[in-house]
Image (cartoon, rainbow, N blue to C red):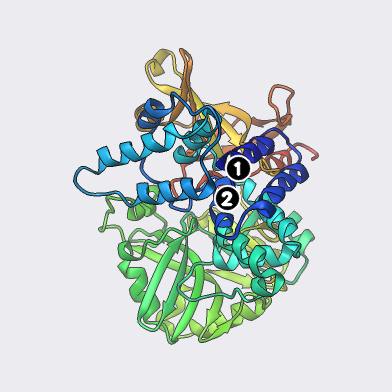
């Protein structure tokens, strides 16, 4: 298959807002791909090279994107091999060798192919909502049930592997994909609830109400003495969190997969600032900050997979695992089948302890990874959203010379790029303004006199009073009184809230 065919399919996907049309274009391409081409084609259309980030910046690529080939000649294997060689080039003199490899690749590429490569290698093609479209396309191309594809993806964590499995072996091969201790599972997510009363009315009495912590999501796998820890984005952080490893290693089991959150606590047991928790996951980790784990789900225990069991069964197994007195503090606080009054007490207790709110979960629900469904709903007293930063404007007055007013985008549920829903300069400290001013130019895809337009890489959490209808923005909705709470380095644009979540905050909506 020619690389130009992939570029053309990507352009067709970008040219339509129809989810069905996007999936059809991708499915048509996958049907034409040979066996060894399926994995790279799938990864590219989802915006992620198989090789991951290869460490090439805009400046280098900008120098190379010239004198394109007149006619397409690159094949999919050609490009995949080039990216593999590029990712493996390290050590003394590697910068020059990497630039030579890139120059060879770009010289053989047409103008359209060069533009695609620039966007692919800088992460600009990465659109989280497109993941769901690609899964639909895989199901259509392989003529298999979409549910089978989604389950295999949940368990493997790889779109490329899921596509290759579906197209090579169909439903039988997909069904053979199982949870594997040591391979992270995509986490189940909670959708926003408007109020505790509304969520309880929606889900009924057969629920558990648990604390919603202001921490970092973790998934911990144990296999004998080997313990490994991943973040919400499935980035392994085992070496940086020895206290979490030690606590899970002390549990009375041989194998386990635990889901939970971790955060730093002060001497009084109250949560420290979110930044303190996240300081443990950076390149310069602050080892003086100790993390405490709180587990709320159990996906596997001693050879038994629990994913398909109702939450009530998983919680029983978790309670038994953490039954010893020395392990009781590892359990997320909550109450099963509470009365409305008891549920309100859990929420009040969470807020009094310094946490964000509660999560209400249906006890009959299996573990549905990677989805924000009705089965789990989070309730916070203040509306908050995770949005993508699309740009920033230069400030004036006291903020002159600083990038201040940020442009906010919600994730397009139909697979397009983030949709702008508002701007804000509220809630920013001087330190945050300095950080934005120093950081944003390196992420800029366009620079103007008024400010910068950014690649969709950063996620910021904002508080807001609600939403209102607005013809000013393409999604027809705008934020009301949005203010910055913090940036979320633990989340990617694929984790941002959708345009539908913003619309759900419309008065009477």
Q: Report the front residue among 33 and 304.
A: 33
CA–CA distance in space, label 2 to label 1: 7 Å
Q: Can residue 54 be seen in this view?
A: yes
Closest to the observer: 278 or 273? 278
Mark on residue 6? 1
Q: Quadrant of residue 106?
A: top left
Quick one: 278 or 426, which is closer to the camera?
278
Residue at left offset 59%, top offset 60%? 35
In the shown orientation, is residue 101 left or right of residue 294? left
Tell me residue 472's x, y (percent).
70, 22
Picture residue at 59% right of the left edge, 34% below the top: 409
Q: Where is residue 276 in the image (x, y as percent from the top left)?
A: 35, 51
Q: Does residue 44 sit above or below 288 in this rendering?
A: above
Q: Residue at x 59, y 56 (%)?
A: 38
Residue 41 — which label?
A: 2
* Lower sequence index among marks 2 and 1: 1
Whether residue 401 is situated above or below residue 38 in the rendered picture: above
Q: Is residue 269 left or right of 349 when viewed as pictured?
A: left
Question: Between 15 and 193, which is closer to the camera in this rendering?
Answer: 15
């Amino acid at each position: 298959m020619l690389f130009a065919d992939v570029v053309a399919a990507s352009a067709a996907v970008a040219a339509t807002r129809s989810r069905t049309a996007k999936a059809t274009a991708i499915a048509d391409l996958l049907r034409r791909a040979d066996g060894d081409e399926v994995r790279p084609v799938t990864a590219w259309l989802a915006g992620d090279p198989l090789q991951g980030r290869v460490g090439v910046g805009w400046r280098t690529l900008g120098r190379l994107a010239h004198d394109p080939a007149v006619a397409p000649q690159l094949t999919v294997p050609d490009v995949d091999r080039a990216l593999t060689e590029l990712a493996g080039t390290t050590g003394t003199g590697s910068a020059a060798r990497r630039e030579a490899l890139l120059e060879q690749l770009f010289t053989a590429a047409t103008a359209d192919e060069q533009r695609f490569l620039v966007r692919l290698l800088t992460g600009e093609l990465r659109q989280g909502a497109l993941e769901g479209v690609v899964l639909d396309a895989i199901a259509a191309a392989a003529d298999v049930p979409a549910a089978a594809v989604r389950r295999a993806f949940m368990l493997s964590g790889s779109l490329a592997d899921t596509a290759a499995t579906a197209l090579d072996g169909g439903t039988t091969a997909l069904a053979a994909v199982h949870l594997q201790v040591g391979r992270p599972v995509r986490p189940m997510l909670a959708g926003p609830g408007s109020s505790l009363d509304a969520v309880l009315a929606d889900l009924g009495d057969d629920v558990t109400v648990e604390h919603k912590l202001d921490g970092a999501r973790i998934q911990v796998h144990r296999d004998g003495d080997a313990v490994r820890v991943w973040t919400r984005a499935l980035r392994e952080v085992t070496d940086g969190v020895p206290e979490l490893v030690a606590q899970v290693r002390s549990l009375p089991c041989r194998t386990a997969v635990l889901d939970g959150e971790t955060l730093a606590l002060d001497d009084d047991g109250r949560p420290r600032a979110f930044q303190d928790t996240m300081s443990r996951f950076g390149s310069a980790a602050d080892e003086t900050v100790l993390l405490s784990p709180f587990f709320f789900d159990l996906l596997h225990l001693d050879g038994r997979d629990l994913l398909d069991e109702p939450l009530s069964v998983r919680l029983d197994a978790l309670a038994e695992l953490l039954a010893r007195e020395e392990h009781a503090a590892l359990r997320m606080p909550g109450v099963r089948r509470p009365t409305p009054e008891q549920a309100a007490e859990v929420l009040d207790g969470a807020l009094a302890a310094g946490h964000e709110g509660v999560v209400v979960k249906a006890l009959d629900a299996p573990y549905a990874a990677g989805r924000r469904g009705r089965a789990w709903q989070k309730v916070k007293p203040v509306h908050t959203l995770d949005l993508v930063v699309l740009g920033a404007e230069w400030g004036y007055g006291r903020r002159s010379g600083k990038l201040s007013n940020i442009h906010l985008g919600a994730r397009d549920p139909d697979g397009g790029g983030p949709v702008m829903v508002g701007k804000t300069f509220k809630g920013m400290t001087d330190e945050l303004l300095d950080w934005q001013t120093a950081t944003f130019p390196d992420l800029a895809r366009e620079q103007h006199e008024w400010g910068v337009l950014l690649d969709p890489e950063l996620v910021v959490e904002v508080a807001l009073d609600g939403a209102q209808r607005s013809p000013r923005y393409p999604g027809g909705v705008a934020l009301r009184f949005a203010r910055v709470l913090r940036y979320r380095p633990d989340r990617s644009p694929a984790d941002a809230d959708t345009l539908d979540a913003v619309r759900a905050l419309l008065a009477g909506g």
